[in-house]
């Protein structure tokens, strides 16, 4: 059962959260977990990393035992309940890694995992077995040399997706170095950085970081992970603006999560918030089967119903693609609702589910 957090936070003011919360003791002090849950949660945090940035701690409503921000970051005893279908490496990344730090699943693009540290640790992370202080180490200089050598040696690699962990926890100097070195590889045309930093720690997004991301020869994209409209604070929107005004193209990625964004109103507000912040909605991910994440999982049919509801109420600019990563590393496929009748292709459904004739020849 989910833990019930304290219904009030006497004496705590928003400004008191100035550092990242990294332990059960920190969470108790911040009135995010009750004292009687400490022992059970210590067992969780001994296996899975915990970090809640000051910005996210300030967002949590301590009067709401089902707060969607807390649900994403505050550990829960249910995380130690592992289901048979869950996998330590749900996307088969180890099998698809030709050299440390590189995952090569598709012919024209690779993942480059620079670090396994994050500014926050999501309780549903599909890499939760390898991120955090007890996880894999950041790429060393020698490791980065080997990874870049592999990328340069394959002329079919058109895009490099920089991930982790969260690569924007690295210093602007290190980010600039990686950008510069990738910019010298002629066959690579696109750099895409995956991060939560602009929402969970927007103060990191300085003019210096924006400059470090720019490339003189490549198109640079940044995929922003956010799951609830409250994450798009004024500070987060300002951080996005700094990146966009520096020439970085922003797209979004969101994980469909029970108790966080599993209703049409919340998803609509989030997608509209992205568009208003000049972030193009990109992917809505069906949750990957990582260990201990069952409390967040919806069925694909539930996700399709939500997507159908969005189609009927949102601008096309605000429509993400609902996708499933096939467990084992077999690729990402769209799993949104269908509008054509397979048994009668000349029948098409509207967003409300009513069927109509669509006669065509050929």
Image (cartoon, grey):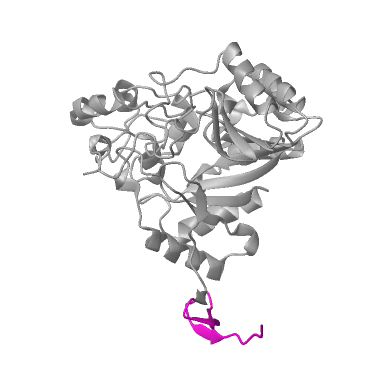
Quadrant (top left, top right, bottom left, bottom right) of the C terminus:
bottom right
Q: Nearer the viewer, residue 251 or 271?
A: 251
Q: How many numbered marks have been drawn onto this rendered protein structure?
A: 0
Residue range (magenta)? 342-362
Residue 101 visible: yes
Q: Nearer the viewer, residue 108 or 122?
A: 108
Q: Where does residue 211 sit, x and y in percent of width and height?
A: 74, 26
Q: Is residue 355 in the magenta section?
A: yes
Up-down relation of residue 259 to residue 190 (above or below): below
Q: Is residue 126 left or right of residue 34?
A: right
Residue 61 visible: no
Q: Nearer the viewer, residue 317 or 57?
A: 317
Q: Where does residue 192 sit, x and y in percent of width and height?
A: 65, 36
Residue at 53 percent across and 78 percent down: it is: 350
Up-down relation of residue 168 to residue 359 (above or below): above
Q: Is residue 197 in the magenta section?
A: no
Up-down relation of residue 281 to residue 52 (above or below): below
Quadrant (top left, top right, bottom left, bottom right) of the N terminus:
top left
Residue most toward the right?
Answer: 216
* Residue 202 picture quarter: top right
Up-down relation of residue 145 to residue 78 (above or below): above
Q: Where does residue 147 sit, x and y in percent of width and height?
A: 60, 22
Residue at 37 percent across and 25 percent down: it is: 49
Q: Where does residue 76 sit, x and y in percent of width and height?
A: 28, 36
């Amino acid at each position: 059962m989910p833990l019930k957090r304290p219904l009030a936070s006497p004496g705590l003011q928003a400004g008191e959260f100035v550092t990242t919360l990294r332990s059960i003791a920190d969470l108790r002090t911040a009135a995010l977990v009750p004292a009687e849950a400490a022992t059970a949660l210590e067992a969780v945090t001994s296996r899975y990393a915990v970090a809640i940035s000051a910005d996210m701690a300030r967002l949590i409503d301590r009067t709401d035992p089902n707060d969607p921000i807390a649900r994403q970051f505050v550990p829960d005893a249910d995380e130690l309940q592992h289901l048979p279908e869950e996998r330590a490496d749900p996307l088969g990344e180890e099998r698809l890694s030709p050299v440390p730090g590189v995952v090569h699943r598709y012919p024209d693009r690779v993942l480059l995992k620079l670090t396994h540290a994050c500014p926050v640790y999501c309780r549903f992370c599909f890499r939760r077995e390898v991120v955090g202080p007890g996880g894999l180490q950041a790429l060393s200089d020698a490791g980065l040399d080997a990874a870049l050598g592999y990328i340069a040696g394959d002329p079919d690699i058109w895009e490099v997706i920089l991930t982790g962990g969260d690569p924007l926890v690295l210093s602007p100097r290190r980010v600039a170095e990686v950008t510069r070195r990738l910019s010298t590889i002629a066959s690579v045309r696109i750099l895409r950085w995956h991060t939560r930093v602009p929402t969970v720690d927007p103060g990191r997004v300085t003019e210096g970081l924006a400059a470090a991301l720019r490339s003189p020869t490549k198109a640079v994209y940044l995929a922003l992970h956010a799951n609830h409209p409250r994450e798009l604070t004024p500070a987060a929107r300002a951080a996005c603006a700094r990146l966009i005004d520096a020439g970085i193209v922003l797209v979004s990625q969101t994980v469909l999560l029970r108790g966080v964004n599993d209703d049409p109103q919340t998803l609509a507000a989030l997608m509209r918030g992205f568009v208003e912040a000049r972030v193009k909605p990109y992917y809505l991910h069906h949750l990957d089967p990582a260990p201990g994440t069952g409390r967040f999982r919806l069925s694909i049919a539930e996700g399709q119903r939500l997507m159908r509801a969005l189609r009927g109420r949102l601008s096309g600019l605000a429509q993400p693609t609902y996708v499933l990563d096939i467990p084992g590393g077999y690729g990402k496929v769209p799993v949104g609702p269908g509008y054509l009748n397979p048994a009668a292709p000349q029948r098409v459904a509207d967003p409300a589910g009513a069927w109509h004739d669509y006669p065509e020849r050929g």
